Image (cartoon, rainbow, N blue to C red):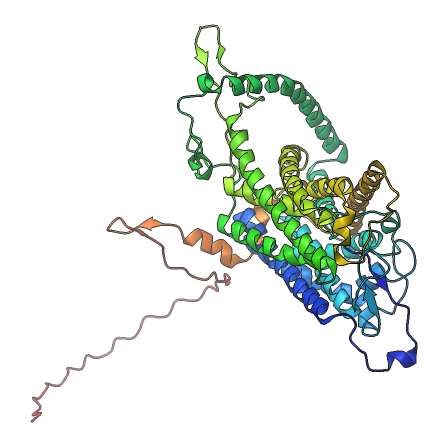
Amino acid sequence: MASVTLAAQPSSAAASQVVVPYGDAADIVWVMVASALVFVMIPSLSLIYSGLGNRSFALTLFRLPMVTAAFIGLQWVLWGYTLTFTGSSMWWGGETRGNALQDVLVRPVSTGDGPNGSQIPELLFLLYEAMFASFTAALVCGGTMHRARPARFIIFISLWALFIYDPVARWSWSEYGWGKQFGVMDFAGGTPVHIVSGSTVAAFAVFCSIESKNSPREFFSEVVDRVKRRLGHLFKGFWSILRILIMVFTYGSLRPPSYDMSDRELDGSQEEDGTRPVFQPYNVNYLVLGTSLLWFGWAGFNGGSALSANMRAVSAWAATHFAACAGGATGMAWIWIWKALPDPDNTTNSQASIDQAGEEHHSEPRQFENLSVYFFCDGAIAGLVAITPAAGYVPIWTAVIFGVVAAIAVNLLKKETEVFLRNDPLQIFAVHAGGGLVGMILTGIFADPVTIGLDGHSTIPNPEYSTSRRVGYQILDAVSGMAYSFTMTLVILYAMKLVAYMFMSTPWKQAAEYDDEFQATMDQQWRHQLDAQGRPRAPAFQRPRPQQAVIPMQPFPPPPDLPVIPSPELQPVNTI
């Protein structure tokens, strides 16, 4: 985000006067629209998380981002904005003039990375930054699937915003932060939004893994064993590269005759042996719709970070769009190419090997459990994440590089997180922390003074820096945010553990207990059955009712014998 400078504290007499709006009307309207677009990104996360998550936790993942956004928005108004942007130390602001919207109507905010930037009202800037804080907290919700009770997660995320998000956002965006003073370039939140949220989910997953073991020593012993296995796979990787080169040059002769490159194998709900895959998104339509809304809202996320309606905002939005296009296309191409390669971990799939009996074995494509559209959405989001810190600093043509590199890096990192972060089923760390780190590094490489000056007054921070020094400060900021958020998350979780046990001991059995009974019963009752004619039908749905205690009652005495009274004969009635 462009640097912001708050005006000095006005006198009490000036504060009591009628406030004159600051800035151009077009700038005010654009930042207001951008704030609304960022807000749209929060329910889009609800769609993505509920579509990717397990069915038993879908409703919780759908509603939790909005509830979290409301609580974080409230704390931002009360003290979050003051701690992040007012003057004091490098970690927290010490002034109270912004608490609970005090005096936010009497000071302008200077925008841009230069001394002569335009101005917008501070109330508008506070609103825009509140959307960022709420969205960042909503990103963390995806790491709670099957692990955290929603009510206690709200307590955790409130402490998280106070001790993690506010300090990191301060050092990245505020003029008093050490990152901004070192010349770190983070246009819209590579470190405070994506790296912090991804590292928080990673710490969440590690904490859950430790709690699920009998002792921390057992957990770390398992991690060491996994590292040894990965090193062994690394040695196999060199041999697999040679086999891949052989397959490339002799692809026509070694291609299995029954191989099918269509999406039929990926989009099916069963494997070749008839079993269901381990991972299946709950609703792919939710995933696609949520990604589309997220893509749409990113126009306000990156384009609005210019805090002004100018050519720099246009360039930021254009770079964002093309990075998402490149990331989505790369994600789709990745699954097609990766599917064609032999699995180096499977020794039976050797390339045209001949066993002792003299029979020739052809390589078989890898077996996948995810849908191809899932890789497209993952790649598009990875491109959006990577371009976030760079949108207002790099030329538009580099957006393609950001999207391609981020999509490849995220897919490679996901293979490792599947091993070391098994309690991060939605792989938020790989997508957001990995994509954010890639974006921060590439920002230092491709930063362009011409693009930065498109608003008419901004200049590149510390122009005397060399490219290597600038990249070094970018990595320092990203790694500091990752380490700080990871460590502080563990501190908060263990501190909360002293107060109350936060996580479920048997998550799969208790997940539906903390979800709506309505959803659980609906999933059980609305199963297709066949009627008498052989057509599928759904049984009538009944809302679950709480079971009531059955009180035993004494049997009624038999009725007494009553005399039988003969009925009178019916007389004909003349109706004419």
**263 to 94, vertically: above or below:** above
Does residue 283 appear in the picture of this structure? Answer: no
**204 to 337, vertically: above or below:** below
Identify the residue at the far bottom of this view.
576
The x, y position of residue 197, in whole percent, is: 72, 48
Foreground residue among 431 and 310: 310
Question: What residue do we see at 72% from left, 66% from top?
Answer: 27
The x, y position of residue 502, in whole percent, is: 71, 50
Image quadrant where one finds the N terminus: bottom right
Picture quadrant of residue 471: top right
Question: What residue do we see at 71% from left, 40% from top?
Answer: 438
136 with respect to 20 (left or right): left
Picture quadrant of residue 31: bottom right
76 with respect to 243 (left or right): right
Figure label count = 0
Does residue 238 appear in the picture of this structure? Answer: yes
The x, y position of residue 298, in whole percent, is: 64, 55
Picture quadrant of residue 261: top left
467 with respect to 505 (left or right): right
Foreground residue among 402 and 42: 402
314 with respect to 123 (left or right): left
The x, y position of residue 460, in whole percent, is: 82, 49
Foreground residue among 458 and 541: 458
Foreground residue among 309 and 481: 309
Question: What residue do we see at 24% from left, 78% from top?
Answer: 562
